[in-house]
Image (cartoon, rainbow, N blue to C red):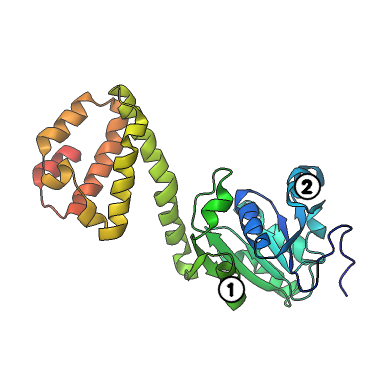
Amino acid sequence: MRPAPLEGLEPTLNQRRLSIIGPGRAGTAIAKALANKGWVISRVAGRSIEHAQPLAEKLGAAACSAADVGIGVDLIIISTPDAVISETALIVAERAEHGALLIHLAGATGIEALEGVRSTRPDLVLGSLHPLQTLSDDTAFEKVQGAFCAVEGPQEIEELAREIGLTPFSVLPANRSAYHAAAVVASNHLVALMGQVERLASSAGVPFEAFAPLSRASIEAAFISGPASALTGPVSRGDTETIEAHLRVMDPSEVAVYKALARDALRLSGRDDAALEEMLS
């Protein structure tokens, strides 16, 4: 039998209730998206009740301990650091409602992070849902809308993703690390590359924002026609003189990254250019 609802949080008939533990930007964004679809955000847990209190108040929920976060809800979202997902799941599962859906939002690991729960709570529905989107600021909720996401688990997980406008796809467990590596390159490494653009632009006395249209157009072209077709520039032309000029004026600390990416551009171009390969080695 379900415990009595928290005071002030009594849902109306047929409303579904969820809770979050480890309420970072990803968890909060998914919870808000579900709230827009009629879910009630019931409980929020963090490192402590005090830590969870500000967000709980903002979401109209109750702050609680990790052990209590699964009480009286249909869905529990684990949004903790990857290293503590398994431990957190065991704590949460102990008092979770019969048949509740328990998911995590990590990208580097799949449903195996919840395997420890199966022996103690075989009645729970387990899954993972990883939004393939950068959620680094307060616009996380807006960015989730229309994003792709990696899902693992029974049909309920895919249905949950589609309910909030995500486009789900599956990743085999053996391919999980490769998938996450691609996500890291597409986001983190791209941002790091923009850091080099900013430094080089500054050395030339050119504003960083001047490169925004070029970068956006290049990325868009890569997704429309494919990276190989979208490639332009001196490497694709075999223009060694221009590349030599770049390397002469560049701060030595920038050379290794420039050469590494130029070598990758050469591979992408399909050119057989021994002189350029030697220059970039």
As drawn, is 218 to the left or to the right of 66? left
Q: Which residue is mark 2?
A: 57
Which of the two residues, 143 or 256, is positioned nearer the viewer here? 143
Q: Quadrant of the C terminus?
A: top left
Mark 1 crowdedness (10 Å alpha carbons): few <14, some 14-19, many ≥20: few
> Image height check: is 100 above or below 218?
below
Kindly state the secondary structure of the residue where label 2 is placed.
helix
The three-letter code of the residue at mark 2 reads Glu
Q: Looking at the picture, does residue 135 appear above or below residue 118?
A: above
Q: Is residue 79 left or right of residue 65?
A: left
Spot occupied by residue 197 in the image (x, y as percentages of width and height): 33, 34
Q: What amino acid type should be assigned to the residue bearing mark 1?
A: Glu
Residue 119, horizontal then vertical, whole percent: 72, 74
> Would you say residue 127 is visible in this rendering?
yes
Q: Residue at x 55, y 52 (%)?
A: 142
User: Who comes first in sequence, dot 1 or dot 2?
Assistant: 2
Residue 25 in percent (x, y) is at 61, 49
Q: Residue at x 62, y 75 (%)?
A: 156
Give the alpha-carbon distance from disc 1 to disc 2, as whole Å: 28 Å
Q: Quadrant of the N terminus?
A: bottom right
Number of labelled discs? 2
What label sits on residue 159 in the rendered view? 1
The residue at 34%/27% (across/down) is 207
